Image (spheres, grey):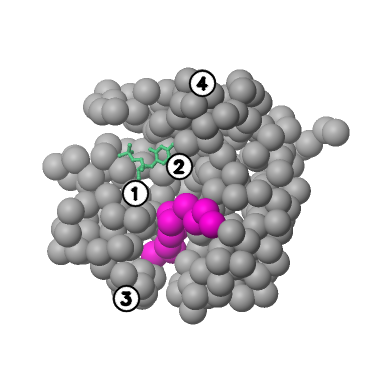
Amino acid sequence: MMFRMHEGIPEVILALDVESKERARGMLKACGDRLRWVKVGLQTYLRDGPDFVREISDSGKSVFLDLKLHDIPNTMAKAIESLASLPIGMLTLHASAGPDALHGCARIARKAMPDTTLLAVTVLTSMDQHALAAIGIASPVEEQVNRLATLAVESGVGGIVCSPLELPRLRTILSSETKLVTPGIRPAGSAVGDQKRIMTPSQAKDAGADYLVIGRPILADDNPQSALELIMEELGPSPS
Ligand code: C5P
């Protein structure tokens, strides 16, 4: 099957991985209005709860809730129902939960949260070939990522979280309607930290990313707003 070429400027999502709600509020203020998306992960959600998600949304940002749901199909579907009253633009679940769970979640999400894009996580980038073998998966990592990404999309999930190096490959096997969301982004000159397989913002754009999840290069900068704007300038003019 041939898919049309992916086009467009990726949106930047700030990974709000900070140690307190006060610091999170300060960081959002410091980033200014050009920041449109915020990723709330387990650290922040379990500490600050749904009210903080509403607060971020009320301040004009879209929320990517990164809870990586993984359970039996009924429990995952009920979890999605529980989240349905929250203003969430994107929500993650594990593709390895399997086809029944993915189909069920996609069906419930279409009904209960029609404005939310479900994103599947395939193989965590912390897992290498040895770690996969230890849990009984003999396939090469790339093959397992392709398999889970294809399964998720065929089950009705709208996007995939992937490493930048997986972007070109996933773009060739998935429709251009499928959103690709990638962490592991480092602007030229910024500290790499614990990220290993990285790309710059413009490399990830050229490789087909729709959204770039960026934390420390913005969070650790003395001027988060200018760090964000530099990244946005590198990406080019915003579509809207
Ligand atoms: O600070 P940094 O830019 O590395 O943050 C990246 C964000 O993306 C963090 O919230 C991290 O948990 C998340 N992430 C990642 N690599 C993955 C999946 C998620 O860095 N494979």
SS at circle 2: strand
Q: Can you tell which quarter of the image residue 50 is in?
A: bottom left
Instruction: Name the residue located 56 percent from the left edge and 39 percent from the top edge.
Output: 122
Q: Bounds of the magenta span?
A: 61-71
Asked if the residue at tag 3 contacts the one at tag 1, i.e. Cβ–Cβ closer than 8 Å, the answer is no
> In the image, which disc is placed on residue 203?
none
Judge: label 3 CB < 8 Å from ligand 1: no
Residue plotted at (73% across, 33% down): 173
Image mark for residue 212: 2
Residue 5 location (% of width, % of height): 72, 34
The Cα–Cα distance between marks 1 and 3, rounded to whole angstroms, is 18 Å
Q: Mark 3 Cα within 10 Å, few/some/many (few <14, many 20+)?
A: few
Q: Would you say residue 147 sits in the magenta stretch?
A: no
Sooner in the amino-acid sequence: mark 1 or mark 3:
1
Circles 2 and 1 in contact, beta carbons < 8 Å: no
Q: Nearer the viewer, residue 185 or 229?
A: 185
Residue under label 3: 51
* Separation (CA) of disc 3 from disc 2: 25 Å
Above or below 197: residue 20: below
The label on residue 15 is 1
Callout 4 amino acid = Gln
Where residue 43 appears, as percent x and y from the top left, is 29, 55
For badge 1, the amino acid type reads: Ala
Ligand 1 has an atom within 8 Å of the beta carbon of the residue at disc 1? yes
Task: Compare residues 232 and 3 and report the one nearer the observer.
Answer: 3
Q: Earlier in the sequence, mark 4 or mark 3?
A: 3
First reached walking from the N terminus: tag 2 or tag 1: 1
Verify whether residue 68 appears in magenta.
yes
Q: Quadrant of residue 210?
A: top right
Name the amino acid, label 3.
Asp
| Labels 3 and 2: the sequence-earlier one | 3
